[in-house]
Image (tube, rainbow, N blue to C red):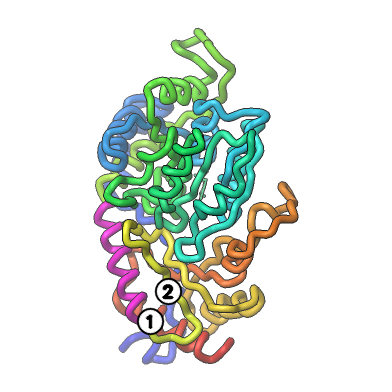
Amino acid sequence: MTAAAAGATPALIPAARPLIGDDERAAVDAVMRSGMIAQGPEVAAFEREFADAVVGGRECVATNSGTSGLHLGLLAAGIGPGDEVIVPSFTFAATANAVALTGATPVFADIDPGSFCLSAAAAEAAISERTRAIMPVHLYGHPADMTALSALAQARGLQILEDAAQAHLASWDGAPVGTFGSIAMFSLYPTKNMTSGEGGMTSCATPEIARTVRLLRNQGMERQYANSLVGFNNRMTDIHAAIGRVQLTKVAGWTETRRRNAATLDAGLAGVAGVVTPPVAAAATHVYHQYTIRLDGATAKARDEVVTALREEHQVGSGVYYPTPVHRLETFALDLDLPETERAAREVISLPVHPSLSESDLERVVSAVSAVVGAGA
Ligand SMILES: Cc1ncc(COP(=O)(O)O)c(C=O)c1O
């Protein structure tokens, strides 16, 4: 008899669940026993393996977080004071923070309602004399329209910088994300499609950019105590790299499971009035870091009530990424007209799609959403 049939409250289905197995533990233990735990051979091997598995061999540099990988990547790409970088506002704050930390100005543009990613038309309208780069975010694991954005960047002499934090193994028109920009950053935070505990990986278009990211990561040192520029300590440790190397062997399988889970959710939710399942562009391979539905026309309050009801009445976890557009956060506090960004911030809910869900978990997610949204919570 199931817990539900017995009348017991079923366990909460979490919105995300990092998968750490015995092999990750063994890899960490081996590094601990080696006595060499700071950045060393594990990091170097992880960089090479990630490059081969994710970005077609483009040189990659590991850092202690995705945010620092993006920050160093932008610095290495020459972004700095006086420059403007066009970013979406419908993203995690780290996207714009990385721009601001270089001394440049993030310029916020609206999104495409289908993909939730930066709109090429909105980006074009935001270009000024000071614009140096366009930085799309492959939000939720769905790539931005890289055909339109790359054409725009080329026509206007701008760089593309990719925030691929959520999009390991996603592709656009057959090309992996992380291969379109001067730099691209993948986050390795625990809830991402693969993790190293904390960490980031920056894919670099040229050996010069990669060299600069490496220098900036390590106090600007070419060799020990030979400092050629002012840098940071943003190194990844071998302990984290050892976790990442094991996860890298599993991420393709997990991605397939995410895609299957998404197809099950698509089918189950197709007929639920008021729910818009996530569209996928014809050129896109979506890796479903998040499976994000819209509650069509909802207010933020009504959406938040659905989130609460899913958790409290059905023990289904979910997330809202992101309830406040970045341009309206206290840190930027801009009064801009970004209607699709505002609408998405009111309407979205991300449902569990992670690879550890069972068939019955997926059925529970579908029936919970049907019951709560159907009931007009
Ligand atoms: C879109 C986006 N950009 C940047 C980051 C920053 O990555 P990290 O948390 O690894 O610093 C994240 C992750 O949280 C993210 O989702």
- Image coords of residue 277 (percent x, y): 42, 74
Residue at the image point whose x is 49% and y is 14% from the top: 221
Quadrant in which the N terminus appears: bottom left
Residue 267 belongs to magenta span:
yes
Tell me how far mark 2 sits from mark 1, CA to CA.
Answer: 7 Å
Task: For residue 283, say whether it is visible.
Answer: yes
Count neighbours of disc 1 (C-alpha within 10 A) and say few if under 14, some if 14 to 19, many if 20 or more.
Answer: few
Instruction: Tell me whether the residue at label 2 lies in contact with that at label 1, contact meaning CB atoms closer than 8 angstroms.
Output: yes
- Please, what is the three-letter code of the amino acid marked with disc 2? Thr
- 34 lies above or below 272: above
Q: Residue furthest top?
A: 226
Magenta residues, start to end: 251-269
Q: Residue furthest front?
A: 155
Count neighbours of disc 2 (C-alpha within 10 A) and say few if under 14, some if 14 to 19, many if 20 or more.
Answer: many
- Please, what is the three-letter code of the amino acid marked with disc 1? Ala
Location of residue 2 (image quadrant): bottom left
Q: Which residue is mark 1?
A: 270
Q: Secondary structure at mark 1?
A: loop
Instruction: Name the residue nearer the viewer: 78 or 45.
Output: 78
Which numbered circle lies on residue 277?
Answer: 2
Location of residue 268 (image quadrant): bottom left
- Image coords of residue 86 (percent x, y): 58, 44
Task: For residue 197, say whether it is visible.
Answer: no
Which numbered circle lies on residue 51?
Answer: none
Q: Secondary structure at mark 2?
A: loop
